[in-house]
Amino acid sequence: MYNVVTSMVRNVTGDEPVRNPERGNAMRDTGLRAGVARRVRIGALAVGASAALVLTACTTPESTPGIEPIDPASLVAELPAATTEVDQVTWGLVEGEPLSLVPGYDYNLVMSNLCDSLLRVNGDFTISPGIAENADWVDPVTFVIDIRPGVTFWDGTPVTPDDVIYTLERHRNDITSGFFGAFVLVGGMEVTGENQVTIHFVAPDSTFREALSGGAGAILSKAFSEEQGESLGTSSGGLLCAGPYQLDSWTPGTEIVLTANENYWDGAPLVKKLVFKFIPDGTTLTNALLAGEVDGAFNIAPASRSAFESSDQGRLILGPSTASFSFGPTRADGAGSNPKIRQALSLAIDRQQYIDTVLNGLGQPQSTFVAPFAWAGSPAADIYQAGYDALATPQVDLDAARKLVEESGEDTSVPLRLAIPAGNKELSQTAAIIQSAAQQIGLTVEIDERQAADFGAIFLDDPAPRENIDFIATTGYTETPGVLAYPQLFLLPAEFGGIFNWSNYSDSQVTSSLQAARTTPDPAGAAEAYVSAQEVFAPDMLQVTLAGAYHTTFLNNRLTGAVTSVAAYATPWALHLGGK
């Protein structure tokens, strides 16, 4: 077993000399926070709900009458592959217009069909070969990538080791990339064959291979990208990748059009034109789907569940996901940093009623902020699952909650302030639920709705936007397999990468175990280290997890073949889309 090399991990927070010195350490830290904050997706689901929870006793969660419970065993990660060509499919983006199509600089459901990765994450969160026919460790600190012979970009030029190194170095050297953290243990890269790249590490990294199955491993053409400069991947620029679809046009404010890459190494798509319409209003998208004007969409409004389930145009598909709703502390000197206050609030919220109210039943209780689907494809899945099953199940106990408030020593006459993004229906409802629960145990919660720029500023380096709030409510997901993304960000000391550890949480067992989980090459050993950390951090509730949300898809009845799990953010989900 290796220990994390402190000097390399400190690169995450800018404590060591920067690779791009003209930016300065402050820029590195702020840029990383901005890049990672983009992955803490706010408003990933378009929810319309209006009810508050009123809890009056110690209860066991039960489903709300009239809401059909979902059997988790019925979740679908991928639909059967299509067999018939389709001229055009129109897809709705409730997330709105992308900021960029360059992996690592935005997170959207378009780019995964454009830029193929070295490895491919499948709908069930297993990993298979991609542009690389093989990419794996040859010893604990040496990772070798063998590029699949004959793979070309859309223009017919071959994908070369130089393209691979160029793309990976973009993330390694650019703190604003959302994938910067995946490369902090990389010591160097070199071309070691006609179709081979070798990466040398300063310590083993159990997360690296998984990262390459998503945007961190999505390969760009070096020559084209350098020519495009700052316009790369924007509506005014272009993109050259090796995925199953190629960028045809981008009309700002309206749509992005992709066309099939007929020379794709894994077979040409059956859908010849894929049109993405920007429809950020959930009601408008719902009506368009039900009318057949739009063929499909992810993250559809759970409030319209019954309409989707009874539709003659298409069907609602529920898939596994890592997405969750939670709230956590924003500063070290507020009541939110007191674990007894967080534990008390957790005990006052009925998770099943929360799921039925906010998600219309399209979710499940979750014991901590890392969802079980995160390890679904791991060879050590049994170890992760056993550790998760040993955690306490969230339950309601108002008497115990009131006792914790009393024991906390906090001044209950001082209101707790909870920040949410303005206009977000599900997080507004979440805030009302927390507020109601707090009132029942002697706490007062005030809701602080912030406009997009002000809410985003909470995640940056400057602590000022967090100084007058105690909690922040968010939704988030991880799009590739692995358990360490959230714990490293929220639980580790700042000098080890805990850029969202605003309450200065510190536990030596958690820190050492998480470090060991990242730098232990053996999957079972890494899993055991993580479970050891989880035993401590889960009860401490640095994030009070309220629910895990299913990945929702609505698809026209004439179509099949889509990936319908959260992996859609990282994999070419429309590759096998087409007619039945």
Image (spheres, rainbow, N blue to C red):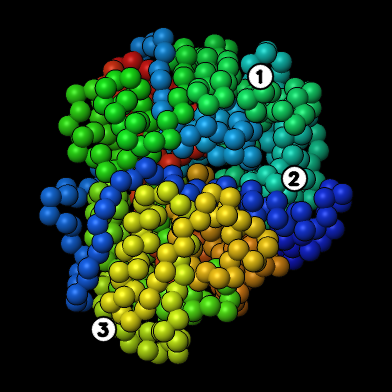
Q: Is residue 79 visible?
A: no
- Is residue 36 toward the left or the right of residue 139 in the image? left
State the image quarter where residue 84 is shown: top left
Question: Residue drawn 57% across and 55% down?
Answer: 454
Furthest residue in direction left, as rendered: 65
Labels 2 & 3 near each other (Cβ < 8 A): no
Q: Earlier in the sequence, mark 2 or mark 1?
A: 1
- Residue nearest the viewer, comparing 277 with 188: 277
Q: Is 478 situated above or below 17?
A: above
Q: Nearer the viewer, residue 572 or 503?
A: 503
Query: Dot 1, how many residues are within 10 Å of its Cα: few (below 14), some (14-19), or many (20+)?
Result: many
x%, y% of residue 257?
52, 18
- Is 479 positioned to the left or the right of 546 in the image? right
Circle 1 residue: 153
Per the image, the residue denoted by label 3 is 399
Q: Residues within 10 Å of mark 3 (few under 14, many from 20)?
A: some
Q: CA distance from mark 1 to mark 3?
A: 63 Å
Residue in the picture at 43% in, 44% down: 44
Residue topped by disc 2: 174
Tell me, yes or no, whether the two marked residues, 1 and 3, touch with CB atoms within 8 Å. no
Q: Secondary structure at mark 3?
A: helix
Q: Residue at x 58, y 12 (%)?
A: 263
Q: Quadrant of the C terminus?
A: top left
The image quadrant where one finds the N terminus is bottom right
Element marked by disc 2: loop
The percent coordinates of residue 378 (x first, y second) are 47, 50
What's the distance in space between the residues labelled 2 and 1, CA to CA? 24 Å
Q: Amino acid at mark 2?
A: Asp
Q: Amino acid at mark 3?
A: Asp
Instruction: Give how far apart the Cα atoms at labels 2 and 3 are.
Output: 50 Å
